[in-house]
Amino acid sequence: MTKKGFTLIEISVVIGIIVLMALVSIPYFRDYQSHTKLKTDALTLISNLRLAQQYTVSEQNTYLIKLISNATPKYQLIKRVGESDTLIEEKNLNQGINWQNTGGFSNNEIIFTSTGAVLQAGDIILIDDLGKTFTVEVKPSGYVRLN
């Protein structure tokens, strides 16, 4: 007569293998998660830059993106008519994502002209807690791309 089932030692070995595999994969998962948040923020920023450009061209009013560095890094989509600014949207960066550099822009503002170009070209570098970066490049023509 044979007994069906597993011994305590067999179950312990299987559980040990599963725990070991989980421990080995945690750092890779953390790295992947951080990279995904960084890329998501960069792509969302590009989308909002293009939206500001589209609004400027279609409405013939000035729209801009203002980059803000404080305890919670964020940016704002603003409509500027004369001296008056109207906040259209505000977007916080994900936790652990920050501005490394916002070179080329006066007052950290990316301002579009009625033709879709920008007043000043430059680069926006986003960085995560692990030191990985994405660069959003804004060309004089208003072309925006991720490097």
Image: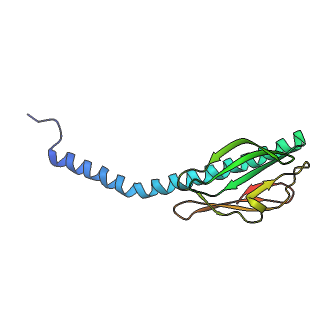
Q: Residue sitting at 30 percent across and 51 percent down?
A: 19
- Quadrant where the N terminus sits is top left
Q: Residue furthest left?
A: 1
75 displayed left or right of 9: right
91 lies above or below 106: above
Q: Residue, x 77% and y 65% (percent of image)?
A: 104
Residue in the image at 83% along x and 41% along y = 55
Q: Residue at x 16, y 49 (%)?
A: 9
Q: Nearer the viewer, residue 134 or 82?
A: 82
Q: Position of residue 40 (x, y in %)?
A: 62, 49
Left or right: 139, with 14 as reference point: right
> Where, by quadrant of the figure, is residue 20 drawn?
bottom left
Q: Between residues 140 and 31, which one lies in front from this camera angle?
A: 140
Residue 79 position (above or below residue 31): above
Measured as percent of width and height from the top left, residue 95 is found at 53, 52
> Which residue lies most toward the front here?
83
